[in-house]
Every structure is written in C-alpha cells, then in structure tokens.
Amino acid sequence: MRFNKIIYIRYIPLTKKIYTDLYMDEVEKAGIDMEYWDITALFFKKDFGQEDSSSLTNTKKFESYEELEQAMLQLQSLDDKLFISIMTFEGRVTRLHKLFTKYNCPLAVFGRNMFPLPKQRISWPFLMEKLNFVKVGNYLKTRRIVRAKSKGLIKPYDIVFLGGQKGWQGIGVINESDIAKSEIIKINSNDYDNALSLKGSLPIINKDYILFLDEYLPLHPDTLLFKIKNVPADQYYPQLNEYFDLVEKQFGMPIVVAAHPKAVRYKSEDFFNGRKVIFDKTSELTEHAHFVLVHDSTSINYPIAFGKKLHFITSSNIYNYINRVHRNVVNFASFLGCNWQWFDKGGSVDLIAKIPEQDYQNYKFDFQTSAETENKLSKDIFIEFLKR
C-alpha cells in the first residue's frame, strides 16, 4: 500500500459534506488509518456557528503551531503518510506550508469544483472603492507566499486530484507550471459524480416544475467567517418571490427550491412564500426539472450533466453589494450560450430555445470530468490510488 495513513487538514471544523466529498468513509472502510486535523484556532477567533461533525472520525484539534509541529514530529517517518489540504493556497496558509516544507510532508490537494471566471475589473477607482485594511493585509501575505514558492522555500503539491482540465484554478494562487510539477490523478467534480451515481432516479415531484438552485445568498455563514459584504436578506427574498410569481404565471408550473446545505434557517422559517424547499436532493430534482434558474452556484454542474436548459438571474442589489456574483452570472451565461436577467426589474423569461451542445461539452471537460473518468466514480479512483 502506498500510504498507510491519511491526514486531512483544514482551518474549518469537519462537516458532513467534507466527510462525504473527500471519501473519508471509504478510506476507513478500505482499512487505511485516517485523521482529521482541525486547525481552526490557528486562523480564526470565532467559529461563527459553523457545523462541527468531529465525531464522524478521529479528529485532532490544535491550538498552536507548536502543537501542530509536535504532531508532525511524532509521525516520523512521513513517507507513507499523506497530508490532504482542504484549504485555498493563499497568504494566510504561509506558515502552515512552511511546516509542510520543513518536514517534507507528502502533500495532496483536490483541484476541482471550479467554474469559468470573468475577467477581473482593474482600475484605480474600482480598486480604491474595494480596498480595506483586511484586503491589503491578505494581498501582502499572498505576495509573500507566491515569492516564497518561486524561490523554492515552499514545496509544491506532490499530488493533485484534478477534476476537469481547469480544475486546478480552484486551488489558489498557483499556475499550470506549478501543477506540472505534481503527480496528476484525474477525477471528477463532486456534482458530476453525484449526477453519475444518481442518474435514472425516480422523480421526487410527480408534476412539471422549474428548479431554483439556492445559494443561501444573503445568509451564508462564510460571509461572516471571511467578512464578505452581502445583499440584504429583507430585500433579496421579497424581490425573488415576486419574480418567481411572474415565472410561474408565464410557464404554468411551480418553482421548487433546491436548498443550499448550509441554509439552516430554511428549516424553521418560510423564506419562499410557501414554495417547496428540499434539502440534499439537488441531483434528483435537476434530472426531472423543466428548466433551471440559478445565480452562480457550482450546482450548475447538475443541469449541464443532465442536459437541462439554464436561465441565469441577478439583481441591482447583487450588482451593488456583491458584484463578483453578478459578473459570474453574466460570464456563466456567456460561456454556456444561455441568457441572463435582472430578477428585480420584471419582464418575461427569455429561455433558450435549445441546449447549446458544444458549449455544454466544453464546460464538461474543462470543469467536470475527463475522457478517462467520465464513466467512473472519483471515490473508486481515489481508493485505488491510495492502495496501489
């Protein structure tokens, strides 16, 4: 066996989704020793109400870099221990990666679940408007880690589990030349795997419906964790519901909401005026939907995998408060040959007449899968790699 111990490491407590998405259950069933190293305390002073599912596996929590270094020392030798980083490679992880380098820890990362990005707006008025002390500090830290990497002071990733030709873009501030130094194991995006494994499912709703891929946009806990400006919830949901009323009237069928997994308030509060809100069934709901409404959710992997028409929506508040999301909406629509619309300005839905097959195909192999893995599940590829 190539590795007899896998250590997942992250600056956020373990969640059920991470446990599932990174095949932790499969690793344990394969008889491979596994630990989850929770280093949240090294990066954040608060937990912002984040889920903590540490009980799912053997979890170690660290309060200092000294504790972390001692744990690495106790693992010697490290040749058959694989560290899997579940963090973006950017300035805040510099000290951590220096430890990986110091002890030459075999280091892997998943490069997947990426999507096409719009060109960055770079102008002095734009920069002056967006800059603040936190962003400037993060920028300087990121410059330092890039410089350290270029000088060989920080080791590259040894192994990259890559979903789609451009999945590496989701790892952080690295480029293709960095990836070229790594061992590449081709896999799929999480959503593509889910669609592949659940294809042919029975309908959950036995009538025609339109699906909305929810992002919990105004209330997502990550906006608190990373201090991201957001749209006001008291405006977002009423505007969205007014738009949904118009869409339902135009097409003569209800809108069903595929809830974001972190949308905990949906379970006790009605944000969608009585419409069906369903958790953990996005793949099944998408396969049988008439068409799909979305902002910039990575869950568009499902309608692309199932060949469903997409219609992208944004609003004035999204444009003003979280312009990045607005630009993603416009870019998604352009990349996929679909249309987009302001949902707060009324008007009918100009739904595409037919699926733009070539655009969907380009997206599939850029961001979802590869010719070698399109009919294989990533969990099987992953375990086979660890055991060979």
Image (cartoon, rainbow, N blue to C red):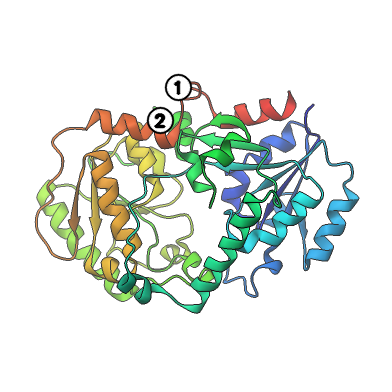
Please name the amino acid that badge 2 sits on: Phe
State the quadrant of the C terminus. Answer: top right
Q: Are the residues at dot 2 and dot 1 in contact (C-beta closer than 8 Å)?
A: yes
Give the residue pinned by disc 1: 371
> From the viewer's perspective, is 25 left or right of 227?
right
In x, y percent, where is residue 193?
49, 33
Is 68 above or below relative to 356?
below
In x, y percent, where is residue 163?
50, 35
- Using the numbered discs, state the Cα–Cα distance from disc 2 to disc 1 in whole angstroms: 8 Å
Note whether residue 174 is visible: yes
| Residue farthest along the front direction in this orientation | 151
Residue at 40%, 54% (x, y): give it. 259
Residue at 83%, 58% (x, y): give it. 69
Identify the image quadrant of residue 198: top left
Residue at 25%, 46% (x, y): give it. 333
**Mark 2 surroundings within 10 Å by alpha-carbon count, few (fewer than 14), some (14 through 19), many (20 or more):** some
Is 95 above or below relative to 255?
below
Please name the amino acid that badge 1 sits on: Ala
Note whether residue 52 is visible: no
Q: Choose between 102 and 280: the one closer to the eye.
A: 102
Count of marks placed on residues: 2
SS type, badge 2: helix
Identify the image quadrant of residue 191: top left
Give the residue pinned by disc 2: 365
